[in-house]
Image (cartoon, helix red, strand yellow):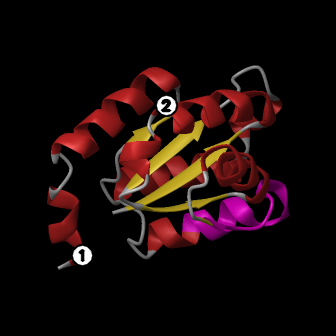
Amino acid sequence: MQIAIIAHDRKKELMTQFCIAYCGVLNRHRICATDVTGKYISEATGLQIERMLHGSYGGDEQIALKIEYNEIDVLLFFRDTAEDSIYNPVELNILRLCDLHNIPVATNIATAEVLIRALDAGDLDWREYVHG
C-alpha cells in the first residue's frame, strides 16, 4: 500500500518518532512524504521514502494529485492546529479529496496509531480492491 506523510513544522519530530516506533510496519509499504518530513524520517529510520517537493513549494499539491489519481491508500497528516495553515486551501483540499476517495486519514498521533495497527492487521486491505 502507498502511505503519504505530511507534518507541519512543529509536528515533524512527533511524526519522526511515530515512524521510528512503527518502522517495522511502514517498511512493508511504499511511502511518500513532503521533502523535509521525508528527510527527517528516512534519516531516523532508514526507510525508503519518495520525497516530494517541500510542502509550501508544491509538495502538498503533489500529494493531492496522487490522492486525486487514487495512488494513496493512507494519509498521515500531523497538523499543527496553532498554525494559520489549518485554513490553508491546499491542505483543506487534501482532506476533501481523502473524503471524496475514501482514503483513511490520521491528523494526530492517536488516529495514526489506529490506522497503522489496522494496516498491520490487514483491516485496510479493501483499499487493494479500489485499484482493481
* Amino acid under disc 2: Ala
Q: Are marks 1 and 2 in contact (CB under 8 Å)?
A: no
Q: Residue furthest right?
A: 57
Closer to the camera in the image, 45 or 5: 45
Local packing at callout 2 (Cα closer than 10 Å; few below 14, some 14-19, many 20+) is few
Q: Position of residue 64 (x, y in %)?
A: 57, 64
Rendering coords of residue 89 (x, y %): 69, 50
Q: Residue at x 22, y 61 (%)?
A: 127
Q: Which span is picked out in magenta?
A: 50-64
Residue depicted at 42% across the width and 64% down the height: 72
Numbered disc in front, either 1 or 2: 2
Residue at image mark 1 = 131
Name the side, left or right, on which 127 lies relative to 65.
left
Q: Is residue 11 above or below residue 50?
A: above
Question: Would you place residue 109 above or below residue 5 in this image?
Answer: above
The residue carrying mark 2 is 21
Q: What residue lies at 21% left-to-right and 50% top-to-bottom?
A: 124
Q: Determine the secondary structure under disc 2.
A: helix
- State the SS at label 1: helix
What kind of secondary structure does the magenta stretch mostly adopt?
Answer: helix
